[in-house]
Amino acid sequence: MSDLICLVADKNMEAALAELLKRPAALGIRQIGVKVVVHPRRDPGVFREGIEFLRPFQDNYRHGLLLLDEAWEGAPPRLQHLLDQALANAGLSHWARAIVIVPELEAWVWSTSPHVDEALGWAGRQPPLRSWLQQQGLWEANNPKPKKPKAAVEAALYEVRKPRSSAIYRTLAQRVSVERCHDSAFRRLRDTLVQWFGEPR
């Protein structure tokens, strides 16, 4: 039996999650065997078909995980609540969990780590990335993160002519301290992993 089967909404999530799970000590868990699958219909597919996708894997994996963005066209309100309820109704809440990222995966990018500037091609540039985004109206000065994190990532990459790719998310997942990410969905993911696979103290 393997440890964890994950269904995610896109290649960027796949890259980020796969790399993150290669850092068990940082997460406070033991080393685990993981399979990450990308749903061809992205976030709506994970939402509408994810539970039925996971169900057959109960006999082969200790746990299952759904990972998707909250912000997509046609997304219903209270997405996290709906998925939690659906897992409970399916009798899978003891075995699987859904992680809904608010509003989207790029929210995890914007930590205070200097590796963010490097991964986005901004190392050594002036003004600093956060200041430039504020000048562009993409980051309000008193907010810990941009309101539209994906738009901020895309603007930064466009400015330096760096193509958007899964490699950026892979690099960030490899290098950024997990302690620097205070996003609630990321904390839910980490707490879930510790609950399932935490090293005994």
Image: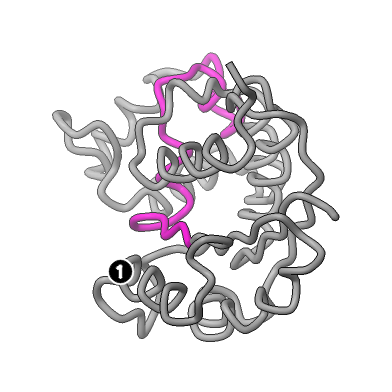
Q: Quadrant of residue 128?
A: top left
Residue 129 pos. (x, y %)? 40, 27
Indicate whether 63 appears above or below 116.
below
The answer to which of 165 and 110 lies nearer the viewer is 110
Indicate whether 54 appears above or below 106.
below
Instruction: Give left or right: position of 30 versus 178.
Output: right
Residue lying at 60% horizontally and 30% vertically, measured from the top left: 198
| Magenta stretch bounds | 98-124
Residue 155 pos. (x, y %)? 44, 47
Residue lying at 46% horizontally and 48% vertically, measured from the top left: 106
Residue 72 pos. (x, y %)? 40, 74
- Three-letter amino acid code of the residue under disc 1: His
The answer to which of 165 and 56 lies nearer the viewer is 56
Indicate whether 5 appears above or below 83.
above
Q: Quadrant of residue 14?
A: bottom right
Instruction: Give left or right: position of 15 versus 47.
Output: right
Residue lying at 74% horizontally and 65% vertically, measured from the top left: 37
Instruction: Give left or right: position of 169 versus 3.
Output: left
User: Which class describes the residues within 10 Å of circle 1: few (<14), some (14-19), or many (20+)?
Assistant: few
The residue under label 1 is 81
The image quadrant where one finds the C terminus is top right
Q: Quadrant of residue 118?
A: top right
Task: Give SS at disc 1.
Answer: helix
The answer to which of 62 and 126 lies nearer the viewer is 62
Residue 139 pos. (x, y %)? 25, 39
The image quadrant where one finds the N terminus is bottom right
Residue lying at 72% horizontally and 53% vertically, measured from the top left: 4
Question: As drawn, which residue projects farthest toward the left?
Answer: 142
